[in-house]
Image (cartoon, grey):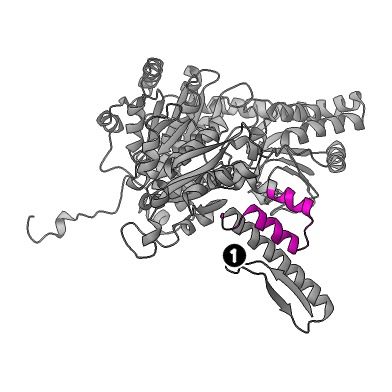
Amino acid sequence: MSRLWIRCAHHKKPRPTKLWGCPRPWARRRLEWQRRDAMKHLIKQYLDSRISRRELLSGLGTLGITAAAANSMAQSLAPFLPAAAAEASADASSASRSVKGTGGALLVAQLKASGIEHIFFNPSSGAAPFFDALVDESSMHLIKALQEGALVAMADGYAKASGKTPFVICARPGFPNSMTQLYNVWKDEIPMVVAVDYVNRATLGEDGFEDADHLESIAHPITKWNWVAQSADKIPEVTRRAFKFASTMPSGPVFLAYPEDILDDESQAAVIDQAKFEISMKVRPDPALVEKAGRMLLEAQSPLLYVGDEVARCGAQKDVVELAELLGVPVTRDGGTIGWSKSFPTQHPLYLGAALREMRYPAHVDVILNLGSRLSYGERIQPGIKLIQIRMDPTNLARTAPTDVAIFGDLKFATADLVAAVRSMTTADRLRLISQDRTAKTHEYTATMRKFRESLGRETWNHSPVSFERLGMELESVLDKDACVIAESDSGRKMEDFMSFGGSDKQYFTTTGAALGWGLPAAFGVKLAHPDLQVVSVVGDGAFLFAGPQPLWSYARYKAPVTLIVCNNRSYNNERNRIWNIGGRQFQTGRDMTCYLGDPDIDYAKLASGFGVEGEVVGEPAQLKPALERAKRATADGRPYLLDVHIERNGIGAASTWHPPYSVADLRQRKV
């Protein structure tokens, strides 16, 4: 017989747990399981303040833990205790302080300790104690949005531009309204903490006012972590944990719920600087694998380099340019997801643009090096092509495509190490020969493509309505070299070929999630992060309507000087092209059943005026440049400015304005 003694919170004396008649190996294993579970139970009881430190040490000793190990364990748990226990268990530290107040006040204190400067919010009566605590807090600023999806998109733009983890709070019944933009955040792996007030614990599950069983489960599929705080003294702890989980690579959104009663409860807790919980993910890659990758690149006859968003996140842009130039490797980006940034200079002579399923150049690729890209176009990686992948996201490293060398690590370290490895394997003269031949061929190809684009630009220059090619060229002529462009226009991607991004040039932001309504509010967040940079939002009319006009209110309220361009072609243009390319009945009959947005024809400048934002309609190509100049002057004066640019539809069925006719008024039997 084996016996394990466990001290239970509900028993004054230890009680025995017996194992009868088990074979000895199973008995040992069962004992280990019970020992582990008992240890977890003790720790939970201690963190919940249901047993004392002495009882914890005694219980751990009963489980066979040495006194030194038990004391060390108790010390490591001290920062997670309510303030009174923490002060008795841990040395005083400047990074930790005890705070008394409502749960809302504790939340404000911890957000301040987590470095939060802006709180993105939509009001909720359940969170009143939190907002009450902000009345006398001057270091944090409230940024209000009128719709929860726009709220999350604002925070997304801020996170992408600043590299910080934003805090978002909204009412619990409004949270489902945020889901489309939370999906975008999740797809792009952007750090964010999204919180709601939760129903009073005393009435939870009664199906009362704004009650919903397991609201956190709604967020589960598109968040890294979700949690409901259990008591006021736990609010700082779970908030710190949320920021840690959100910001640790691979980053992503997390969801928190604070029951309204604990936000109002008076309590005391330890508030600790977030820096004490941060983890550096700048991991150096395996040198042996880097050397193997370098040798493969040196021996390759026709290599190709994919560059993804992780390059920008790691600040590895210059290192990647050095690697590409060292070997003369042509550079592309994922053609499926496109990416939310431009991690390689788009006007560099080695840059090919987005990858296509069938690329004319380079021919006969034998090695692909993927630096931080999702590689969603797997068709490009044909049998016989060797694949090297370097990612900082181990979950998606070698996820789908068969990979010959899979390297986990920080992209800046990895690229610098790869450059060093290649240099060490051969002479400078051989490297020069390899690079010269490849570079000359790629330069010839990209120069030819540039001439083709210039020809296309001249051909479409006077198109009316305005062509995307002209919009791109006109924007390029008026934007500052360090401007930020926020794009959400599927058809408008062609304008990007006439602009320069990446390197020391303009910054580019979009979302790979493709849930519409992102661009207009996201540009507000980018401007908040970079108030001293010129910011321009370019969105399709369909995307603008998904955002609603509500973000315009925030632009006016907070005087955010951004140029807002609506590409108004009265259509979900690329959606129609995709549908008609299938060759179904819509294509056969020439009837656009779903995508025409005219009738009524919306005047976005008038719409903006109703929200206090100046604007104008650009109906003809000759009006575009002067309108852009007026927008530039308005933003320099500190005001947002909207341009409703009438832009051409293109592709299959572009000329059609037909849509299914239907009138509710005609259904009436009497005129009411």
Q: Nearer the viewer, residue 280 or 414?
A: 280
Taking the spot 68% from the left edge, 68% from the top edge, the residue there is 6
Q: Is residue 508 magenta?
A: no
| Numbered disc total | 1
Residue range of the region highlighted in magenta in the rendering:
49-74
Q: Nearer the viewer, residue 283 or 142?
A: 142
Mark 1 residue crowding within 10 angstroms, few (<14) / some (14–19) / many (20+): some
Q: Is residue 61 magenta?
A: yes
Taking the spot 64% from the left edge, 40% from the top edge, the residue there is 277
Taking the spot 44% from the left edge, 44% from the top edge, the residue there is 103
Q: Quadrant of residue 292?
A: top right
| Image coords of residue 89 (percent x, y) | 65, 45
From the image, which quarter does the N terminus lie in? bottom right
Q: Is residue 572 visible?
A: no
Using residue 82 as the reference point, say whether residue 542 is left or right of it. left
Using residue 520 as the reference point, say whether residue 604 is left or right of it. left
| Image coords of residue 670 (percent x, y) | 7, 59
Q: Is residue 564 visible?
A: yes
Placement of 325 over or under 542, stated as above or below: above
Residue position marked by numbered label 1 in the rendering: 9
Using residue 481 as the reference point, say whether residue 542 is left or right of it. left
Q: Nearer the viewer, residue 552 or 90?
A: 90
Magenta residues, dominant SS class: helix
Three-letter amino acid code of the residue under disc 1: Ala
Report helix, strand or loop for mark 1.
loop
